[in-house]
Amino acid sequence: MSPEPTRTSAIADLMRAGREMSRLSMVFRYAIADRLGLTVSDLECLDFLADAGPATAGQIADRTNLTTGAVTSMLRRLQQSGYLTTERDPADRRRVIVTPRPERIAELEQPYERFASRTASLIEGYSTDELTLLTDHYTRMHQMYADELDQLRDGRPHTGGPGPASSP
């Protein structure tokens, strides 16, 4: 048997596994948001703020792919729920700085605790080389997603291809 059909099959398996993981990840996020009484957009906003710290409403709009009007409504809702605070940027009073409240953000971690523990156990089984490969894969996928989102937002035509490969 030539190596090409095996590679073709392996690529198909990888693509199928990636789609399934993406689907399950999305379903998981919806279930977590529902359990917390939030929307998925609320959860994504809070997740972004937990990682990034204070951000502007415009940065949140970019990250969540929501309109500025939708972000304003979401921020008002999350502020009323006690998840964050907002204040005008002293350098530019037109901008709003959004700051997560650490004690409330910590509450968001509870539904993920079992999954995080299982993920840590899974990762322990990988060699350093495998972890490096996976990190490179996720980094490249991240860039491809960001590029595709930019094209969708700008209305640019799809150019196809996997994009430039990064060097190790």
Image (cartoon, rainbow, N blue to C red):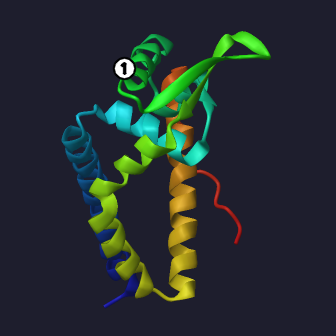
The answer, for residue 161, to whether it is visible in the render is no
Callout 1: 10 Å neighbours few (<14), some, many (20+)?
Answer: some
Q: Is residue 23 above or below residue 134?
A: above
Residue sitting farthest toward the right: 91
In which quadrant of the rendered image does the C terminus lie? bottom right
Percent across and percent down for residue 25 are 29, 53
* Rendered residue at 25%/40% (across/down): 36
Q: Nearer the viewer, residue 88 or 16?
A: 88
What type is the residue that disc 1 sits on? Arg
The answer, for residue 53, to whether it is visible in the render is yes
Percent across and percent down for residue 135 are 55, 68
Q: Nearer the viewer, residue 104 or 144?
A: 104
Residue sitting farthest toward the front: 103
In the image, taking residue 113 as reference, residue 133 lies left or right, namely right
Looking at the rendering, which quadrant does residue 121 occupy? bottom left
In the image, taking residue 16 as reference, residue 146 lies left or right, namely right
Q: Is residue 64 above or below residue 1?
A: above
* Rendered residue at 55%/48% (across/down): 51
Q: Judging from the image, what secondary structure is the residue with disc 1 in?
A: helix
Q: Nearer the viewer, residue 148 or 21?
A: 21
Which residue is tagged 1?
77
Q: Nearer the viewer, residue 165 or 88?
A: 88
Total residue callouts: 1
Percent across and percent down for residue 129 are 57, 85
Looking at the rendering, which quadrant does residue 103 occupy? top left
In the image, taking residue 53 as reference, residue 26 lies left or right, namely left
In which quadrant of the rendered image does the N terminus lie? bottom left
* Rendered residue at 27%/67% (across/down): 114
Percent across and percent down for residue 16 are 27, 62
Q: Is residue 57 above or below residue 137?
A: above
* Rendered residue at 50%/72% (across/down): 134
